[in-house]
Image (cartoon, rainbow, N blue to C red):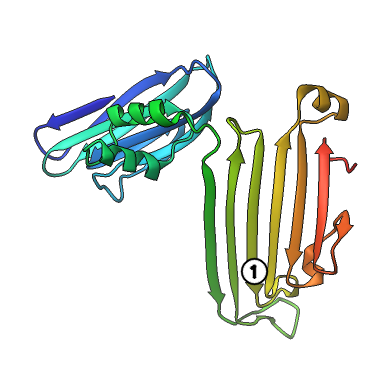
Amino acid sequence: MSSSGCSGDSFSAVWNAELLPEEDGDYTFFVQADDGFRLWIDGEMTIDWFSKPLARPLAVTVPLQGHTGYPLLLEYFDDKGPGFIDVTWQRGWVSYRGAKRFAEKQGKKDIDADSLNKYFEEYGRLEGAAPLFSLVASYAETNSFLVPVVGVNDPFRQDAGHKLSIKGTAGRYFGGGRDRKLELTATYDDVSNDESLQNRFVADLTWVETLSDTLAQAVGGSELVVTLIWANKPEFRGEVDKDFGLRAGLKWSLGNGKKH
């Protein structure tokens, strides 16, 4: 889906379509536009590039079921100068940096449909093997205040404080599909008025493996989950199946979450 070389300024357009994947899997959508756009898939906004329009490709990967129709809505606007938009999608996870470097080797400034197709031909679809990473942080401060309470001499008092929360996740799928995943999660919290969350750091290293149909039927579930835990204080570690000192431990579940 593309539109290029549009004349005129300050116009907008909307495209409606239906996606009908042939197979189950993860599908990666690349969108490049000048100026801004929003991409909706199955009623959910997957990319919002209205507030920071820039002529660069953006990508999003979503799981879709084969032989199922998904409504696609694309909103586009042009502010000044030439306008264009190009949408490309492929089945499988895509390494954006890898695809961009490949396109540059082909003598192109950025990713387009032709370079993306050639990239898949040479390297194959990555499926779920792309690395995963996320980082979320928040910080808030509160001032002290008094709240009068009817019938009580002393008002309710809230002391000044702060709340800091940071969570990072990094992982990778192994194999051609998404049957095996290794994931590291690190969480840090510091809440001044909550002792259970003061200077709290917990790291989890988790292995998740999808069981074969025969084993899944035998144990009544579909996954093996093994997690190694470390905390900076014993009280933050939580319950485990195997102790490694006071701050570290191992826990596992098989099938429906029952311990074995």
Place residue 179 in its image quadrant.
Answer: top right
Q: Is residue 43 left or right of residue 238?
A: left
Local secondary structure at mark 1: strand
User: Considering only vertical position in the picture, is 53 above or below 15?
Assistant: below
Q: Is residue 236 left or right of residue 219?
A: left
Image quarter hosting the N terminus? top left
Place residue 180 in its image quadrant.
Answer: top right
Specify few, some or many for label 1: CA neighbours under 10 Å numbering under 14, 14-19, or 20 or more. Answer: many
Residue pushed farthest right? 260
Number of numbered discs visible in the structure rendering? 1
**Along the line of sight, the residue nearer the viewer: 72 or 12:** 72
Residue pushed farthest bottom? 153
Residue pushed farthest left? 8
Image quarter hosting the C terminus? top right
For the point 31% across and 33% down, the residue is: 75
User: Considering only vertical position in the picture, is 93 above or below 48?
Assistant: above
User: Considering only vertical position in the picture, is 217 above or below 80?
Assistant: above
Provide the residue designation for mark 1.
Answer: 189
**Along the line of sight, the residue nearer the viewer: 102 or 97:** 102
**Along the line of sight, the residue nearer the viewer: 209 or 63:** 209
For the point 70% across and 64% down, the residue is: 202
Q: Residue 152, how many percent across, how many down?
A: 75, 81
Place residue 49 in its image quadrant.
Answer: top left
**Along the line of sight, the residue nearer the viewer: 245 or 49:** 245
Three-letter code for the amino acid on which mark 1 is drawn: Asp
Q: Is residue 257 left or right of residue 169?
A: right
User: Considering only vertical position in the picture, is 129 above or below 18?
Assistant: below
Q: Is residue 190 left or right of residue 51?
A: right
Q: Residue 72, how many percent across, how many down?
A: 40, 26
